[in-house]
Image: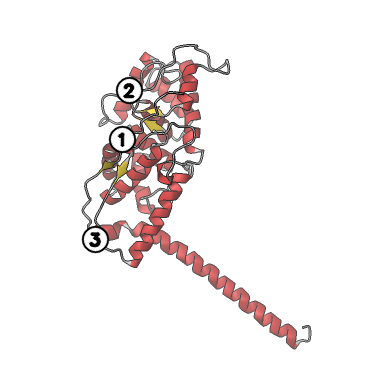
Amino acid sequence: SNTAPSRPCPAAQRVRTRAQPAPSPARAMAGANETEVMRRFGREPLSAEPLRPGLVPGIGAVGAQKLLSKGVASAQQLMGRFLLFNCSVDRFMADLKDAGITLHWAQQIADALAAKAVGFCTDDAPEYPTSPTKGTDGRTTTVSESFARSPLPTTTLVPSQVPGLGKAGISCVRKAILKMAPTLHPATPSAVQLLGLFLSLGRVRESYLNFLVDECGCQLQHAERTVAALESKATQICDVPSTGELDGGRTPGTPAGKAKAVRLPPTPENPALAAADSADSSAAIDKDAGRARLALGWLLALGFACAVLAIYLKMAGFA
């Protein structure tokens, strides 16, 4: 194929350079733990489990509680929230800070989600199918096939882009999304935001059908096609292990593209604030260390018991 590669979202391409003093041993350990969380988050599927320390970079027990105020209880819903802001890192960080997340952790959370989104989002306008209307299997349409295999664009939705969603449905969805998030850019919705709303609602089919039919006024048969397409897309993104930007690659099946790094201004480092913010990461490290000590203690006790038993058997004449 001679099709030009899709261009990933610029918002999801970020390189930060920050001059930092030499870290203390405790801080170095916390940094190593955060790096491992980042790598794991980049490789593994998006979890539907309740948020907990070590699941998403930058989120500890306190941060997970704060995010509940935004209706975010899982990594999938967190990604949905990011997509709802159309991959706008600045607006998403403002939303995190509004929930009480400090700047340091808001940046880390946004970086992780933006890097993962590179694998399935693009700023390029999609190519619309013209003919034939039927897909290669004779049952699906070319619109459905194109939506399933292509990255999600951040450009404004138009008819023939998402299965089941025409001009009237797009207008209704736009009003509903702007009502939910008034700070969004008026050129909405996009396919990215449409999926973001689906993930934010917990991937519950009935909830999204009710949203499209009751809130947006879409016809049921068209809404069912839209939800089916979004369910399939969510499965690709959330349930399949990723090799995205966090892991040095990209999600299988998506076009490659050259990432243009966006350099952000350095963030002032406040030692007192940083120490307070690292409490969750330190707690997770202490918990792991405690488990290791407990396991070692049991091993030592078992070895001692075996030695005592061997001595007893020898004295009793069994050895």
Q: Is residue 15 above or below residue 286?
A: above
Count residues near mark 2 (Cα–Cα under 10 Å), then give few for <14, some for 14-19, many for 20+: some
For mark 1, give the secondary structure: helix
Residue pointed to by mark 1: 10
Q: Quadrant of residue 67?
A: top left
Instruction: Decide if residue 203 is on the left or right side of residue 136.
Output: left
Please report contact status of discs 2 and 1: CB closer than 8 Å, yes or no. Answer: no
User: Could you tell which of marks 2 and 1 lies nearer the N-terminus?
Assistant: 1
Q: Residue at x 38, y 55 (%)?
A: 34
Disc 3 marks which residue? 271
Please identify, in this view, whether the residue under mark 1 or under mark 3 is nearer the observer: 1
Q: Is residue 262 visible?
A: yes
Locate residue 59, reporting x and y percent.
Answer: 37, 50
Q: Which amino acid type is marked by label 3? A: Pro
Q: Disc 3, disc 2: CB below 8 Å?
A: no
**Residue nearer the viewer, 103 or 154:** 154
Is residue 53 at least partly visible in the picture? no
Residue 65 in the image, given as x and y percentages of width and height: 37, 48
The earlier-in-sequence mark between 3 and 2 is 2
- Dot 2: what SS? loop
Q: Quadrant of the C terminus?
A: bottom right
What number is the disc on residue 156? 2
Q: Which residue is situated farthest in the bottom direction here?
A: 315
Quarter of the figure with residue 259: top left
**How was this image coloured?**
secondary structure
Q: Position of residue 268 (x, y in %)?
A: 21, 53
Q: Residue at x 40, y 40 (%)?
A: 116
210 w.r.t. 159: above or below: below
At horizontal 46% and vertical 62% (from top left) the residue drawn is 288
Amino acid identity at mark 1: Pro
Viewer-side residue, 144 vs 7 = 7
Distance Cα–Cα, label 3 vs label 2: 43 Å
